[in-house]
Image: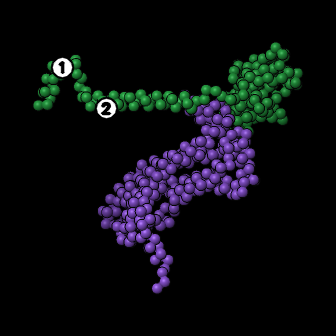
Chain colours: A purple, B green
Amino acid sequence: MPKTIPHYFDELRATRVWRSIFRGGTGSSTLRRSMAIQQNVFLHLFSTKVRRRMVSFSATWYLGTLTLGTFLILVTTGIFLMLYYHPSVPQAYADTKDLEFVVSSGMFLRNLHRWSAHAMVFLVFAHMFKVFYRGAYRPPREFNWVIGVILLIITLLLSYTGYLLPWDQLAYWAITVGSNIASAVPVLGNKVHFLMLGGNQVNANALLRFYVLHCMILPLTAIFFIAVHFWRIRKDGGLYAHQSEPKSLAGRAAAAGKVMP
Amino acid sequence: MQDDTNHDQKAVSHGFTSEVSRREFFVKLGLGSLAIAGAGTAVFAYQFLSPNVLFEPSPIINAGKPESYPLDSVTLDVNSGIYLVHSQEGFFSLSAVCTHLGCLTAWKPELGMIACPCHGSKFKQDGEKIEGPAPKALPWLKTWVSDDGDLMVDRSTTVRPLEFVRV
């Protein structure tokens, strides 16, 4: 009797190497399935079990997942761009031009990075509108909304710091204007401006600081908060939590003997 | 009962032992040292992040001979961000950096005014504000004639308006 493809997969899952990596073991019982989720460092952030309705397109329009998708594209393309870009005043603009016109697929990667960045900002806002109008920020998920706001700020800071890196006229004046807005902070304004730019004007220090923020500090902070954000979804009762319905509404519905949709 | 014994002990050892237990004392000591270390780290971080040496152009600019500026002219030096104005009353220089958000303004000879390309602020030839969003007039910069007869401008020092330099 010829073996089918699923049969080969079952054999693979039974090997010692596979079982040393994935401890859940073979079989498709509910216990095995939930263990497969629980015992995986990445998947354990999610629920072991979800209702089909919760992951349907209409539940979230996949806005959060799409935001994560753009973030992953940005990390990947960003790492490739870092291989050709020097954050120094004489080289930054020339490197950007080289990425456009000299490096193979450089224009594709740079455009992918740029458009994903625009898409991410758009998707973050769309995700927040969706959460807001669905009332999904209500208890027990109010803290996850706060983490979401932090992630919004990180997203905007990533866009802002990335804006300077091509070192063209648009970048230079945008950062001049943006950093001068920071100096409008009462009392500390000029100090904040000085620390941000590493000097009094947008110059070599500012370029390097924005590069480090853009490529190291902000992405790592974002990954940290994204992990907490995803973990909280599960801990706060999944994508639909009945507790999040307004009490007055739920109470009235119960009194009238109706079932909440 | 406990209250009574405490009361007695306090009465006996008044002035020698405080009411803080040994454990509490060490917790406070630990938290106190952590707070001091935290404050030290904040100061250290602030000092590390503020550069002590800056590789920025000198604020003092040699603008060349006064004769190179014709009467009733406004000359913008893009690199240093200043205007050198030769008016009927004499020479003076203005910062060309907009007081709103730091863009470089431009002299519009056809309109006889200084305008900012970023957000549309307008200024008179002597720096006075015509229209916002800029909050203030363009500052007058300290200007003098060097021993060699060159016009010098100090961008870091502002002076009161209408202090003309006569050559």
At 48% across and 80% down in the image, what residue appears? A4
Say which residue appears at 30% left-offset and 62% top-offset.
A255
Q: Which of B74 and A202 is in front in this view?
A: A202
* Residue A146 x/y as whole percent: 45, 47
The disc label shown at residue B13, or none = 1
Q: Is mark 2 on a helix, strand or loop?
A: helix
Residue B115 in sight in this render: yes
Residue visible at 41% across and 50% down?
A142
**In this view, which residue lies farthest toward the front?**
A16
Residue A37, x across and y down, in percent = 41, 62
Q: What element carries label 1?
A: loop
Relative height, residue B134 to residue A252 (above, below): above
Specify the quadrant of the image occupied by residue A26: bottom left
> How far across and how far down the image is residue A40, in percent?
42, 59
Q: Which chain carries label 1?
A: B
Q: Which chain carries label 2?
A: B
In the displayed image of the protein, which residue is found farthest to the bottom? Answer: A1
Determine which of the numbered discs, if any, sits on residue B27 in the image.
2
Whether residue B133 is visible here, answered yes or no, is no
Q: Which amino acid does label 2 sit on?
A: Val
Density class for disc 1 (Cα within 10 Å; few <14, some 14-19, many ≥20) is few
Q: How crowded is mark 2: few (under 14 residues within 10 Å), some or many (20 or more)?
A: few
Quarter residue B76 falls in = top right
- Quadrant, the C terminus of chain A: bottom left
Residue A173 located left or right of residue A5: right
**What is the three-letter code of the residue carrying label 1?**
Ser
